[in-house]
Image (spheres, rainbow, N blue to C red):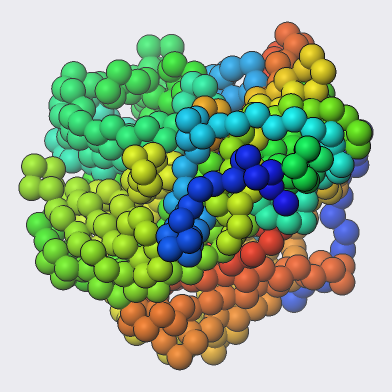
Amino acid sequence: MLASALAFCLSAAAQQTASSSAQQLQSYDLRREVSLVGKVVKFDAASGVAPMGAHVLVQTGSGQVDVHLGNAKVLQSSHFELNPGDSVRIVGENLAFSGGTIFAARVVQKGNQAVIVRNEKGAPKIVGGTLSPEQTEALRGVR
Amino acid sequence: MKRLLLVLASAAALWSAACSSGGGTTVLPPPAGKFSNSSLNGTYAFVSNGEVATSGGTGVLARTGSFTADGSGGIMAGGVEDTVTQSGTGTLVNPDLTITGGGYSVGADGRGSLTLNISGLSPTTITFGIVLTSTGGGLLIDETFTNTQASTGSGNFFKQTTADFTNPVLPTVATYVFDFFGLDGTGAPASLVGEFTAGSGSVSAGFEDVNDNFTLTNGNIAAGGTLVADPAAPATLTSNGRGLATIAGEQYYFYVVDTTRIRFISISGGVMLTGDAVVQTNPPASLSNGFAFLVAGSSALGGLTRAGRFSANGTAVTNVLVDTNNNGSFVQTSGATQASVTMDPANPGRGTVTFLGNGLGTPFTFVFYLSSATSGVIQETTQANGLVAAVADGTIGGQTGNPFSSSNITGTYALNWTGLSLQSGVADEEDVVGQVTASNLALTGAADIFQFQNVNGPQTDNAVTGSILFNGGDGTGGDGKRSTMAVTLTKNGQATTVNFVVYFINPQLALFANTSTSSTRIVAGALELQP
């Protein structure tokens, strides 16, 4: 259940059409961003539930929120782990998806470490982490 | 499929160099067909887009190059390749890599493998699974899996006309329609479609539509562009048709296939774009045809595919079907209102199409550039509340030869799909290349699949079975009845079935996208009839 503070304010009359349209057409809008604070209940690098990618279930003061984190490999390459009980702060917004909504994260923070998983236009990052000079040199050898 | 799902490709596979190469044994019947090693004979320009993992770094990978096959299983020295990788640290261009030799095999069904030996740093060999669509080219997937590099991706190759490796480049002035897709310098998805006039080594004018990180712009391509020999490797122009292009301020390496097709890979500004420019011939001033299309790219939720079709008659648009896979949410839209198509008199072949799908509150919009009356490129420009919905582009084709049925959808087809699938606990790139025989709408054949998380590497020689179903219609009649396709890959007793919606452009070419409503896969691809 999504926290009521994060819910969209759609009129009942517009709900059906907007929901159907939005799941195909909705865009990420920085002006809608909110901050979500809570504890990790469960982390899935590749959830069996759409949208494809990493999901984290977060217990907030208003209930549990399913958060889409984008590409799990961006987290992995940043050596960022999420475990049950971890306190997290997630910046993102609700997007209509598959008849409901999904909280799409842009930034996920645990302690002093924060990882950007979407850019400011909402595009999930597909490359992440900072490579060492040795790793960069290895890429220079790509044929 | 012209447009690949580069933005679906993720970068950081946890591939281990210690893992052994794999495979296993699947006994397939001897392939039937008319191909052999002699079918691959001459110089070919190739591209692939995917991802790479080395012992240290990982990234997204684009490669473009040229190799020469000797017609008897050997790759001759003298080829060249350019690669571009983008990682969390930035973009690396590895230019002018020399192909020193290699080998290949082509079975009777046109399937086979291709290895290219590259000079310099390891690995010295890159490997592709291939299928010929004719002696003029084919489809490929990157199957490189050595102890220093694993790379995957989908692409294709075209036979080059070496007589067209001229200097100045492109002696005859002509208009070319292009589609460049990939990542901008920040790693965000980017799509450029347009047209330019080129000849005698110059790019003199043009117009383009750009979607860079969900921001749409369009406008003239300034004169002053060039297509010249690469000053760092001038001999590659005459040996492989390779040179250096400057178009709209961006630099590219290019490969001349012939005077009708040029291949590009960007090398400036950290940008990672690849694509082809195809000569424009008699673009229509108005449309009176059915068109099928497939775009692929990224939404705010991840990978996105949109396949569909519409009928155009003047400015009227009817019989609209759209199938959207938005990172695991599959939605079908049948019929539309507020539908129209407009051709741009100032830029021949350029047009826009819009339609409000039934049940939706926001219209779909697209811009397209036709290189002929029945083929072109298309970019999605849909906006909701002033915000761009996706960065996606792909192929549009005029539907001819319909109705499609078992009587004309028959014969052997090359098959390729690419995208993401759920593998070993993460979503990662999946590429498939194969060949199927369609008979009474049943499919049989063989294919390679490379799921990048597979520690055993690419899985070759899967048995393929499946079917095409026209569901009482062929998808062109606007009756809401789509054509579907099911493909099952089987190896060592393990079977995977993927369901698709399929749109035939003509009996020789079909575009398809999977219909999964779970988060297990988002892929799209093409069927191309073999001769």
Left or right of B507? Residue A132 is right
Q: Residue at x 21, y 56 (%)?
A: B372
- Where does residue B227 sit, x and y in percent of width and height? 28, 24
Residues B219 and A44: in front is: A44
Residue B516, placed above or below residue B439: above
Left or right of B123? Residue B230 is left
- Where does residue B164 sit, x and y in percent of width and height? 29, 37
Residues B93 and B485: in front is: B485
- Where does residue B472 sit, x and y in percent of width and height? 45, 91
Residues B104 and A10: in front is: A10
Q: Residue at x 19, y 59 (%)?
A: B341
Residue B490's image quarter?
Answer: bottom right
Residue B523 visible to an observer of this rendering: no
Left or right of B351? Residue B126 is right
Residue A82, placed above or below residue B419: above
Q: Residue at x 10, y 57 (%)?
A: B285
Left or right of A119? Residue B323 is left
Residue A49, placed above or below residue B185: below
- Where does residue B391 sit, x and y in percent of width and height? 44, 41
